[in-house]
Amino acid sequence: MSEDNVKKGFGKYVWIIGVVALFGTGGLFAYLESLGLQITCEDRVCDVNNICEVYCNVKNPTSQSVYLFNHDDWKITFSPEINEFDLYAKYYGKWRYTNFTKATRFPNIPDDKLYVFVFPRYSTKEFKLEVKLIDTARIKWNFGELDPIIQPYEYIYKNLSKQVPVYTKVCTPTIDAKNVSHIEDCISKVSYKTEYYKGDKTGVMIDKKETKNPYVYVNEKKGTLSESLVPWGNRNFNDPLLGQGCRDYEIEKGVCIESAI
Protein backbone atom coordinates (compact mmCIF):
# COMPACT_ATOMS: atom_id res chain seq x y z
CA MET A 1 0.00 0.00 0.00
CA SER A 2 1.52 3.28 -1.07
CA GLU A 3 1.99 6.44 0.97
CA ASP A 4 -0.66 8.05 -1.25
CA ASN A 5 -3.23 5.64 0.12
CA VAL A 6 -2.32 5.81 3.81
CA LYS A 7 -1.05 8.99 5.44
CA LYS A 8 0.17 9.11 9.02
CA GLY A 9 0.14 12.32 11.04
CA PHE A 10 -1.78 13.30 14.14
CA GLY A 11 -3.99 10.27 13.49
CA LYS A 12 -4.20 7.41 11.05
CA TYR A 13 -5.64 8.26 7.64
CA VAL A 14 -7.21 5.67 5.38
CA TRP A 15 -8.03 6.37 1.76
CA ILE A 16 -10.90 4.30 0.33
CA ILE A 17 -9.93 3.60 -3.28
CA GLY A 18 -11.39 0.51 -4.93
CA VAL A 19 -12.06 -1.35 -1.71
CA VAL A 20 -11.82 -4.87 -3.09
CA ALA A 21 -8.47 -4.25 -4.76
CA LEU A 22 -7.02 -2.15 -1.95
CA PHE A 23 -8.17 -4.02 1.13
CA GLY A 24 -8.69 -7.54 -0.22
CA THR A 25 -11.81 -9.68 0.11
CA GLY A 26 -12.27 -8.65 3.76
CA GLY A 27 -13.13 -5.10 2.69
CA LEU A 28 -12.68 -1.82 4.49
CA PHE A 29 -13.58 -2.93 7.99
CA ALA A 30 -11.25 -5.91 7.87
CA TYR A 31 -8.47 -3.42 7.15
CA LEU A 32 -9.59 -1.21 10.03
CA GLU A 33 -9.23 -4.20 12.33
CA SER A 34 -5.60 -4.45 11.28
CA LEU A 35 -5.15 -0.88 12.55
CA GLY A 36 -6.31 -1.90 16.01
CA LEU A 37 -10.03 -1.16 15.79
CA GLN A 38 -12.28 -3.79 17.37
CA ILE A 39 -15.43 -4.69 15.44
CA THR A 40 -18.39 -6.60 16.82
CA CYS A 41 -21.47 -7.48 14.82
CA GLU A 42 -24.54 -9.55 15.63
CA ASP A 43 -26.04 -12.43 13.70
CA ARG A 44 -29.76 -11.88 13.07
CA VAL A 45 -32.87 -13.94 12.44
CA CYS A 46 -35.54 -11.84 10.68
CA ASP A 47 -39.01 -12.23 9.19
CA VAL A 48 -38.64 -11.96 5.42
CA ASN A 49 -41.67 -9.65 5.31
CA ASN A 50 -40.00 -7.00 7.50
CA ILE A 51 -36.95 -4.78 7.23
CA CYS A 52 -34.08 -6.58 8.98
CA GLU A 53 -32.02 -4.40 11.33
CA VAL A 54 -28.48 -5.51 12.18
CA TYR A 55 -26.32 -3.69 14.74
CA CYS A 56 -22.53 -3.41 14.82
CA ASN A 57 -19.99 -1.55 16.93
CA VAL A 58 -16.55 -0.29 15.95
CA LYS A 59 -14.39 0.44 18.97
CA ASN A 60 -11.17 2.41 18.72
CA PRO A 61 -9.21 1.59 21.89
CA THR A 62 -6.03 3.19 20.56
CA SER A 63 -4.59 6.61 21.28
CA GLN A 64 -4.91 7.72 17.63
CA SER A 65 -8.04 8.62 15.68
CA VAL A 66 -8.63 6.94 12.33
CA TYR A 67 -9.78 9.16 9.46
CA LEU A 68 -11.40 7.89 6.24
CA PHE A 69 -10.90 9.58 2.87
CA ASN A 70 -13.18 8.27 0.13
CA HIS A 71 -12.32 8.46 -3.58
CA ASP A 72 -14.93 5.84 -4.41
CA ASP A 73 -18.33 5.00 -2.93
CA TRP A 74 -17.66 2.10 -0.58
CA LYS A 75 -20.04 -0.83 -1.02
CA ILE A 76 -21.25 -3.48 1.39
CA THR A 77 -21.47 -6.81 -0.41
CA PHE A 78 -23.81 -9.69 0.34
CA SER A 79 -23.92 -13.36 -0.62
CA PRO A 80 -26.42 -13.98 -2.11
CA GLU A 81 -26.65 -10.45 -3.53
CA ILE A 82 -28.87 -7.86 -1.83
CA ASN A 83 -29.60 -4.56 -3.58
CA GLU A 84 -31.88 -2.74 -1.13
CA PHE A 85 -30.13 -1.78 2.11
CA ASP A 86 -29.06 1.30 4.06
CA LEU A 87 -26.26 1.86 6.56
CA TYR A 88 -26.60 4.28 9.48
CA ALA A 89 -24.18 5.50 12.12
CA LYS A 90 -25.28 6.94 15.45
CA TYR A 91 -24.56 10.64 15.80
CA TYR A 92 -25.52 12.36 19.06
CA GLY A 93 -28.07 9.67 19.84
CA LYS A 94 -29.72 9.66 16.40
CA TRP A 95 -29.20 7.42 13.38
CA ARG A 96 -27.80 9.18 10.30
CA TYR A 97 -27.41 7.59 6.89
CA THR A 98 -23.85 7.13 5.63
CA ASN A 99 -22.10 5.56 2.68
CA PHE A 100 -18.71 7.00 3.60
CA THR A 101 -18.84 9.72 0.96
CA LYS A 102 -18.53 13.49 1.25
CA ALA A 103 -22.26 13.85 0.61
CA THR A 104 -23.08 11.98 3.83
CA ARG A 105 -20.43 13.47 6.11
CA PHE A 106 -21.57 14.34 9.61
CA PRO A 107 -21.81 17.99 10.75
CA ASN A 108 -18.85 17.62 13.09
CA ILE A 109 -16.49 17.36 10.10
CA PRO A 110 -15.40 20.84 8.91
CA ASP A 111 -16.15 21.70 5.28
CA ASP A 112 -12.48 22.35 4.52
CA LYS A 113 -11.49 18.80 5.56
CA LEU A 114 -11.15 16.04 2.99
CA TYR A 115 -11.95 13.07 5.21
CA VAL A 116 -15.50 11.70 5.23
CA PHE A 117 -15.62 9.75 8.50
CA VAL A 118 -13.64 9.53 11.71
CA PHE A 119 -13.27 6.93 14.45
CA PRO A 120 -12.09 9.04 17.41
CA ARG A 121 -9.52 7.63 19.79
CA TYR A 122 -10.86 5.76 22.82
CA SER A 123 -14.40 5.74 21.42
CA THR A 124 -17.05 3.39 20.04
CA LYS A 125 -19.08 4.05 16.91
CA GLU A 126 -22.47 2.33 16.57
CA PHE A 127 -23.79 1.24 13.17
CA LYS A 128 -27.16 -0.06 12.00
CA LEU A 129 -27.70 -1.90 8.75
CA GLU A 130 -31.25 -2.05 7.37
CA VAL A 131 -31.77 -4.79 4.79
CA LYS A 132 -34.83 -5.49 2.66
CA LEU A 133 -34.92 -9.28 2.45
CA ILE A 134 -35.70 -11.10 -0.78
CA ASP A 135 -36.38 -14.66 0.35
CA THR A 136 -35.38 -17.06 3.12
CA ALA A 137 -31.88 -17.83 1.84
CA ARG A 138 -29.11 -17.42 4.45
CA ILE A 139 -27.06 -14.26 3.85
CA LYS A 140 -23.40 -13.58 4.56
CA TRP A 141 -22.00 -10.08 4.33
CA ASN A 142 -18.70 -8.26 4.79
CA PHE A 143 -18.65 -6.04 7.89
CA GLY A 144 -15.12 -6.88 8.98
CA GLU A 145 -13.81 -10.42 9.30
CA LEU A 146 -16.63 -11.54 11.60
CA ASP A 147 -18.62 -13.23 8.83
CA PRO A 148 -21.98 -12.08 10.22
CA ILE A 149 -25.10 -13.98 9.18
CA ILE A 150 -28.65 -12.84 8.43
CA GLN A 151 -31.12 -15.72 8.46
CA PRO A 152 -34.55 -14.80 7.07
CA TYR A 153 -37.62 -16.92 7.74
CA GLU A 154 -41.27 -16.89 6.68
CA TYR A 155 -44.31 -18.58 8.14
CA ILE A 156 -46.29 -20.56 5.56
CA TYR A 157 -50.09 -20.45 5.53
CA LYS A 158 -52.82 -22.18 3.56
CA ASN A 159 -53.75 -20.07 0.56
CA LEU A 160 -57.52 -19.73 0.71
CA SER A 161 -59.88 -17.88 -1.61
CA LYS A 162 -63.40 -16.51 -1.66
CA GLN A 163 -65.70 -14.96 -4.24
CA VAL A 164 -66.43 -11.28 -3.65
CA PRO A 165 -69.29 -9.50 -5.45
CA VAL A 166 -68.48 -6.49 -7.63
CA TYR A 167 -71.38 -4.16 -8.37
CA THR A 168 -71.40 -2.13 -11.59
CA LYS A 169 -73.96 0.56 -12.38
CA VAL A 170 -75.13 0.41 -15.99
CA CYS A 171 -77.29 3.23 -17.40
CA THR A 172 -79.00 3.59 -20.76
CA PRO A 173 -78.96 7.11 -22.32
CA THR A 174 -82.16 8.42 -23.87
CA ILE A 175 -82.81 11.34 -26.25
CA ASP A 176 -85.86 13.59 -25.64
CA ALA A 177 -87.91 15.59 -28.16
CA LYS A 178 -85.41 18.46 -28.01
CA ASN A 179 -82.55 16.11 -28.87
CA VAL A 180 -81.14 16.35 -25.34
CA SER A 181 -79.46 13.28 -23.91
CA HIS A 182 -80.57 12.01 -20.50
CA ILE A 183 -79.19 9.16 -18.36
CA GLU A 184 -82.09 7.00 -17.23
CA ASP A 185 -83.00 3.40 -16.62
CA CYS A 186 -79.93 2.62 -14.46
CA ILE A 187 -79.53 -0.92 -13.18
CA SER A 188 -76.88 -2.66 -11.11
CA LYS A 189 -75.07 -5.66 -12.53
CA VAL A 190 -73.25 -8.08 -10.29
CA SER A 191 -70.04 -9.90 -11.14
CA TYR A 192 -67.59 -11.75 -8.90
CA LYS A 193 -63.84 -11.65 -8.36
CA THR A 194 -61.59 -14.01 -6.46
CA GLU A 195 -59.81 -12.70 -3.35
CA TYR A 196 -57.03 -14.72 -1.74
CA TYR A 197 -56.22 -14.70 1.97
CA LYS A 198 -54.15 -16.58 4.50
CA GLY A 199 -55.66 -19.54 6.28
CA ASP A 200 -54.16 -21.63 9.06
CA LYS A 201 -50.40 -21.85 9.48
CA THR A 202 -48.86 -24.94 7.88
CA GLY A 203 -45.18 -24.47 8.74
CA VAL A 204 -42.18 -22.20 8.32
CA MET A 205 -39.60 -21.64 5.56
CA ILE A 206 -35.97 -21.19 6.68
CA ASP A 207 -33.03 -21.08 4.27
CA LYS A 208 -35.41 -22.20 1.50
CA LYS A 209 -36.32 -25.36 3.44
CA GLU A 210 -39.84 -25.85 4.75
CA THR A 211 -40.63 -27.29 8.17
CA LYS A 212 -44.13 -28.69 7.76
CA ASN A 213 -45.58 -28.28 11.21
CA PRO A 214 -48.38 -25.84 12.03
CA TYR A 215 -47.19 -25.63 15.65
CA VAL A 216 -43.91 -23.77 15.13
CA TYR A 217 -42.46 -20.56 16.53
CA VAL A 218 -39.32 -18.62 15.58
CA ASN A 219 -37.63 -16.75 18.41
CA GLU A 220 -35.66 -13.98 16.67
CA LYS A 221 -33.78 -12.89 19.79
CA LYS A 222 -32.64 -16.39 20.74
CA GLY A 223 -32.23 -17.53 17.14
CA THR A 224 -34.20 -20.73 17.75
CA LEU A 225 -37.01 -22.71 16.15
CA SER A 226 -39.52 -24.35 18.49
CA GLU A 227 -41.76 -27.18 17.26
CA SER A 228 -44.61 -28.55 19.31
CA LEU A 229 -45.37 -32.18 18.52
CA VAL A 230 -48.91 -31.87 19.88
CA PRO A 231 -51.63 -29.31 19.05
CA TRP A 232 -51.71 -26.05 21.00
CA GLY A 233 -54.87 -27.06 22.84
CA ASN A 234 -53.21 -30.19 24.21
CA ARG A 235 -50.48 -27.97 25.70
CA ASN A 236 -53.16 -25.97 27.54
CA PHE A 237 -51.96 -22.73 25.95
CA ASN A 238 -53.97 -20.71 23.44
CA ASP A 239 -51.09 -18.54 22.24
CA PRO A 240 -48.56 -20.51 20.13
CA LEU A 241 -45.62 -21.14 22.46
CA LEU A 242 -46.48 -17.86 24.17
CA GLY A 243 -43.69 -16.17 22.24
CA GLN A 244 -40.97 -17.94 24.19
CA GLY A 245 -40.51 -21.44 22.80
CA CYS A 246 -40.42 -24.89 24.37
CA ARG A 247 -40.47 -25.18 28.12
CA ASP A 248 -37.94 -27.43 29.86
CA TYR A 249 -40.51 -29.95 31.06
CA GLU A 250 -42.03 -30.15 27.55
CA ILE A 251 -38.62 -30.93 26.09
CA GLU A 252 -38.11 -33.61 28.78
CA LYS A 253 -41.50 -35.15 27.95
CA GLY A 254 -40.65 -35.12 24.24
CA VAL A 255 -43.65 -33.03 23.21
CA CYS A 256 -41.63 -30.00 22.07
CA ILE A 257 -38.34 -29.65 20.20
CA GLU A 258 -36.18 -26.54 20.21
CA SER A 259 -33.23 -26.13 17.85
CA ALA A 260 -30.82 -23.38 16.83
CA ILE A 261 -31.46 -21.76 13.45
Image (cartoon, grey):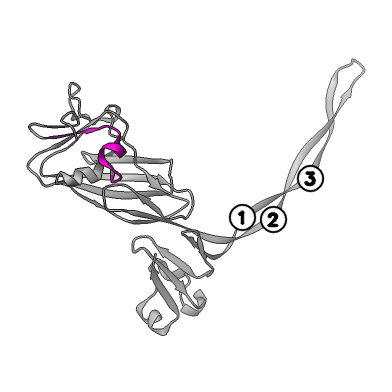
**Total numbered labels:** 3
Q: Is 192 displayed left or right of 196 in the figure? A: right
- Which mark, by number, is residue 162? 2
Q: Are marks 2 and 1 in contact (CB under 8 Å)?
A: yes
Local packing at callout 3 (Cα closer than 10 Å; few below 14, some 14-19, many 20+) is few
Name the spot of residue 229 as percent of width and height, x first.
Answer: 49, 77
Nearer mark to the viewer, of 2 and 3: 2
Q: Amino acid at mark 2?
A: Lys
**What is the magenta range?**
12-26
Q: Of residues 27 and 158, which is closer to you in this image?
A: 27
Q: Residue at x 30, y 40 (%)?
A: 88
Q: Residue at x 80, y 40 (%)?
A: 188
Q: Amino acid at mark 3?
A: Val
Reading the chain from its start, which is encountered first: label 3 or label 1? 3
| Distance from Cα at disc 2 to Cα at disc 3 | 16 Å
Disc 3 designates what residue? 190
Q: Is 228 displayed left or right of 121 in the figure? A: right
Reading the chain from its start, which is encountered first: label 2 or label 3? 2
Q: Residue at x 30, y 30 (%)?
A: 72
Magenta residue check for 20:
yes
Name the spot of residue 215 as percent of width and height, x first.
Answer: 50, 70
Q: Residue furthest bottom?
A: 253
Q: Of residues 185 and 58, which is closer to you in this image?
A: 58
**On screen, residue 14 above or below 113:** below
Q: Secondary structure at mark 2?
A: strand
| Distance from Cα at disc 3 to Cα at disc 1 | 22 Å
Disc 1 designates what residue? 197
Local packing at callout 1 (Cα closer than 10 Å; few below 14, some 14-19, many 20+) is few
